Image (cartoon, helix red, strand yellow):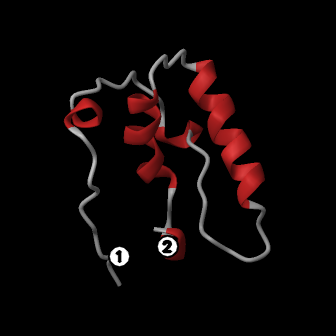
Amino acid sequence: MAQPTFPLPLPSLVTNANLKNIPPTALPKFYGLATKDPNNFLFEFDKLYHKFDYNINAHKLKLFPATLKESAL
């Protein structure tokens, strides 16, 4: 069953932020499972963010929704 998509209310700063090529396999994924620690996921996401030298939070805001899967979305 296809997951519903919800428009994200992101400011124009975010929608105009250009992202570098990050392989989709490099993105951490969070499924919202009770057995997984969301803080660990956020730590991994932050490490990736710094690894690719993103310098404004708009990049992080644009990239973050792609990491959420299933019930976390």
In the picture of the structure, the residue carrying the numbered disc 1 is 3
What secondary structure is found at the residue carrying circle 1? Answer: loop
The N terminus - image quarter: bottom left
- Disc 1 marks a residue whose amino acid type is Gln
Mark number displayed over residue 41: none
Relative to 25, say whether 1 is above or below.
Answer: below
Q: How busy is the neighbourhood of tag 2: few (under 14 within 10 Å), some, or many (20 plus)?
A: few
Query: Between marks 2 and 1, how big is the CA–CA gap?
Result: 7 Å
Q: Is 12 placed left or right of 69 in the picture?
A: left
Given the current orientation, which residue lies at the most extreme bottom position? Answer: 1
Q: Residue furthest front?
A: 11
Question: From what the image shows, is residue 39 above or below residue 37?
Answer: above
Sequence-wise, the earlier of marks 2 and 1 is: 1
Residue 66: x %, y % from top left:
43, 50
Q: Amino acid at mark 2?
A: Glu
Where does label 2 land, which residue?
70
Residue shown at 29% from the left, 26% from the top: 17
The quarter holding residue 48 reads top right
Q: Is residue 50 found left or right of 2 in the rendered image?
A: right
Up the image or down, 57 lies above or below 51; here it is below
Answer yes or no: do the residues labelled 2 and 1 have beta carbons within 8 Å?
Answer: yes
Residue drawn at x 32%, y 78% as measured from the top left: 2
Out of 2 and 5, give the one closest to the viewer: 5
Q: Quadrant of the C terminus?
A: bottom left
Q: Of residues 15 and 33, which is closer to you in this image?
A: 15
Please provide percent x and percent y for residue 7.
Answer: 24, 61
Q: Position of residue 46 (x, y in %)?
A: 64, 34
- Point 26% across, 54% down: residue: 9
